Image (tube, rainbow, N blue to C red):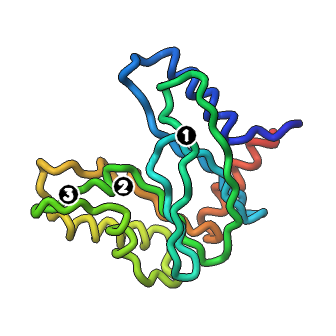
Amino acid sequence: PKKLMTSDLMVGVNRTLCDVTRAEQFVTLMLAVIDSRAGTLTYTNAGHPPPLLLRDGEWTSLKSHGLFLGVAPEAVYTTTTWNLSKGDVLVLFTDGVTETMSPSRVVFRRQGIKATIPAVNHADADSIAETIWQGLEQHDPGRPEVQRAPHPQALRGLRPHDRRHRGVADRVQQREQV
């Protein structure tokens, strides 16, 4: 059977959203599949903040593939596959994380994420995410009127070769084969 690509799924979601939403409404979304056996990340990004990949001390911004969802039914999306290496850190986040503003009106941005984890070495994914949250709290120490990321699901740090995440990827892969 033909393997369904993340871009195919994104096209279908986009067409559905175009049918059911008003013209001024849209959605950003990143759809990703981590294959822990093959060591790959396959994804399509529709206007969502591109994830960051930390490899051997160097940051790379993954790309976005197209228009927000729900805007144009004819929008086309592409799929990108990255080979993952042991020790890679993949940071996924919402714009609520990068747009958090300090009391002095400085925006956290992607640089804020990078600055909070200069040396993660062998830290697990949960520790990395917690370190970023601590950086956010220091950047904006609890002012309720400032836009904040709504909850911990707004930020995810993944270590693709971490055993705890491997089981999740394996279960997803098993469902695809059924």
Q: Amino acid at mark 3?
A: Met
Which is closer to the viewer, label 3 or label 1? 1
Relative vertical location of residue 11 with respect to residue 15 in this rendering, above or below: below
SS type, badge 3: loop
Q: Earlier in the sequence, mark 3 or mark 2?
A: 3
User: Mark 3 highlights which residue?
Assistant: 101
SS type, badge 1: loop
Q: Which mark is residue 36?
A: none
Task: Tell me the distance, in whole angstroms, between the alpha carbons under discs 3 and 2.
Answer: 18 Å
In the image, what residue occupies the spot 61% across and 71% down?
A: 162
In the image, what residue occupies the spot 65% across and 70% down?
A: 161
SS type, badge 2: helix
User: Mark 2 highlights which residue?
Assistant: 152
Front position in the image: 59 or 141: 59
Relative vertical location of residue 54 with respect to residue 171 in this rendering, above or below: below
Q: Amino acid at mark 2?
A: Pro
User: Mark 1 highlights which residue?
Assistant: 66
Looking at the image, residue 36 sits to the left or right of residue 19; the answer is: right
Q: Earlier in the sequence, mark 1 or mark 2?
A: 1
Pinpoint residue 60: horizontal percent, then vertical percent. 53, 68
